[in-house]
Image (cartoon, rainbow, N blue to C red):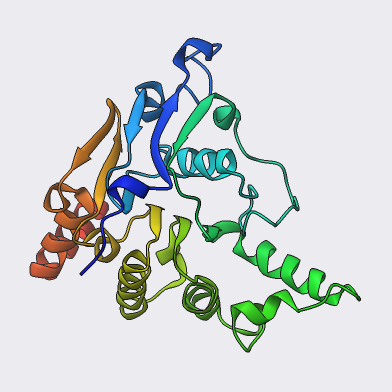
């Protein structure tokens, strides 16, 4: 039985200081979902952001992570490196309402920059005199000695310890459907161990998490939606139920 985080959610509410925004005509505030953001309550231990490419999922997730104290390129709050400064100014206008308890663990996973995190771990472990090797917490094998998908799963299986805040940006990017199911189980175990997840995803498998609050970033703002009403579920279902017809329609349309 999953324990509710109602009274001890690590992040309980996200508020955009709209009165301090210099202009809603410029990026990132011109993104429709950000433009319409006022206050977002996080009432579930698992919050999912969905939306088309360019809808602002990663921008919002990154701002939340950096506002909490995570490194912009990913890692734990103890990571402090920059390969390329690319995060937006959104975090300067966000206010996070924190719960009464502090997490004992935490990690910000960005699929696009996880290679940089793995490289930083190897760099730190090569520095003499720093004590226990960081890489040992991520499994027996170096993250760079594994496939992209294997390293993602090693991170989540080995490094995530529970009672933590985990912010994941498209964690399914390198995972097969079977590995996505394994991730779903791991999320469930970590939630039972008192963790909170905030996830941006396109995966209908991850979106199916039973108690997840799903927020869709759309052209007219953020809307909380049910799993079956997401485009990800509807498109996947239609394709799998009659893939011959869907593929035929796509290819016929493309050749006309």
Residue that appears at 48% across and 14% down: 25
Q: Is residue 256 visible?
A: no
Furthest-bottom residue in this view: 140
What x and y, as percent, mark residue 44? 27, 49
What x and y, as percent, mark residue 9? 37, 48
Figure quadrant of residue 237: bottom left
Query: Quarter holding the N terminus?
Result: bottom left
Residue that appears at 69% across and 78% down: 135
Which of 28 and 187 lies nearest the eye of the viewer? 187
Residue that appears at 64% across and 54% down: 77
Residue that appears at 53% across and 13% down: 20
Figure quadrant of residue 189: bottom left
Which of 246 and 140 lies nearest the eye of the viewer? 140
Count every numbered label the image shows and give the total: 0
Figure check: 30 above or below 100: above
What x and y, as percent, mark residue 190? 38, 68
Figure quadrant of residue 207: bottom left
Which of 128 and 123 lies nearest the eye of the viewer? 128
What x and y, as percent, mark residue 14? 41, 33
Figure check: 20 above or below 9: above
Left or right? Give the position of 40 relative to 229: right
Q: Is residue 138 visible?
A: yes
């Amino acid at each position: 039985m999953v324990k509710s985080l109602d009274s001890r959610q690590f992040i309980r509410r996200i508020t955009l200081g709209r009165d301090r925004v210099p202009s809603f005509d410029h990026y990132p505030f011109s993104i429709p979902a950000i433009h319409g953001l006022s206050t977002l309550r996080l009432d579930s231990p698992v919050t999912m952001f969905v939306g088309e490419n360019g809808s602002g999922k990663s921008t919002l997730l990154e701002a939340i992570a950096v506002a909490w104290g995570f490194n912009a390129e990913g890692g734990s709050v103890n990571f402090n490196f920059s390969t390329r400064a690319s995060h937006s100014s959104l975090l300067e206008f966000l206010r996070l309402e924190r719960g009464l308890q502090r997490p004992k663990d935490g990690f910000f996973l960005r699929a696009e920059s996880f290679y940089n995190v793995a490289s930083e771990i190897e760099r730190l472990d090569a520095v003499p005199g720093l004590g226990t090797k960081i890489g040992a917490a991520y499994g027996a094998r170096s993250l760079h000695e594994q496939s992209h998908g294997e390293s993602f799963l090693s991170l989540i299986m080995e490094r995530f310890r529970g009672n933590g805040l985990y912010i994941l940006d498209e964690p399914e990017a390198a995972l097969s459907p079977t590995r996505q199911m394994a991730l779903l189980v791991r999320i469930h175990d970590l939630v039972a161990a008192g963790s909170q997840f905030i996830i941006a995803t396109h995966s209908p498998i991850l979106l199916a998490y039973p108690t997840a609050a799903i927020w869709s970033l759309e052209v007219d703002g953020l809307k909380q939606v049910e799993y079956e009403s997401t485009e990800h579920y509807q498109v996947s279902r239609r394709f799998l139920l009659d893939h011959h017809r869907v593929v035929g329609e796509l290819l016929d349309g493309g050749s006309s």
